[in-house]
Each structure stands twice: as C-alpha cells, then as structure tokens.
Amino acid sequence: MVLGQVVRRFRDSILVVSRGPLPIGTRVYSERGEVGYVSDVFGPKDEVFLLVRLEGSQPFGKRLYAVLPQTGKGKPSQQGEARPRSRRGTTFYGR
C-alpha cells in the first residue's frame, strides 16, 4: 500500500498524510529499503496523519509504502493451546 505525501520532517520522524489509518507498529518502506514504523495515528477519517518514527539515517524517496497484515480468512490463529472440545461442541475445562 502506498502511504501518501510527506508533510513535514522532524529530527527522528516524519508526518505523512494517508488515505486511511494503519495499525501502530506497521513497518514503513521506501524504494531503498526499510525506513521505520508507524508510531502514532491521528486526525479525521478523511485525512489521517501518520507519525512515522525513522530508524537510522537512511534517506527515503518520494514514495513510502506499508505492508498491511492479513485479515479475514488469512488471519493468523491466536497463540497458545486451544481448549479441547467435546463432540457436542461444549468445552471441557478439567484435567
């Protein structure tokens, strides 16, 4: 996903206008490699601002990208053991 336009650059972060919100912690990339991660999201739904915390001093190009996590059927399962279920669909909690 292409993020949007860089509005302002600070010492260790940049402010980007995005089309929609992204989860905090989403990794951000440029044509040259990884740039940083989304550290804050704010603003109205129509024009969301993302604060991207830069990692290192690597320069970035005009376009920034984010790889979104899978949702829906490709959703990763929860970690930990599932509780055993009986054949009738009730859950056992003993043993």
Image (cartoon, rainbow, N blue to C red):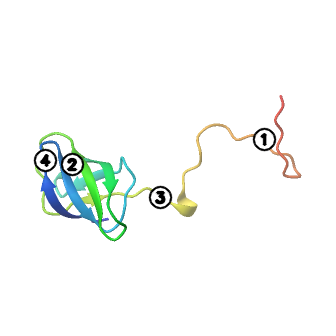
The answer to whether residue 3 of the structure is visible from this angle is no
Between marks 1 and 2 in the image, the one whose residue lies nearer the viewer: 2
Q: Which residue is mark 4?
A: 10
Query: In the rendered image, which quarter is residue 62 located in?
Result: bottom left
Q: Which comes sooner in the sequence, label 3 or label 4?
A: 4
Q: Which residue is mark 3?
A: 70
Disc 2: which residue: 35
Q: Residue at x 31, y 69 (%)?
A: 19
Disc with the residue nearer the chain's start (1 vs 4): 4
Helix, strand or loop at label 2? It is strand
Q: Secondary structure at mark 3?
A: loop
Contact (Cβ within 8 Å) of mark 2 with mark 4: no
Eye-nearest disc, 2 or 4: 4
Secondary structure of the residue carrying tag 1 is: loop
Q: Quadrant of the C terminus?
A: top right
Residue that label 1 marks = 84
Quadrant (top left, top right, bottom left, bottom right) of the N terminus: bottom left
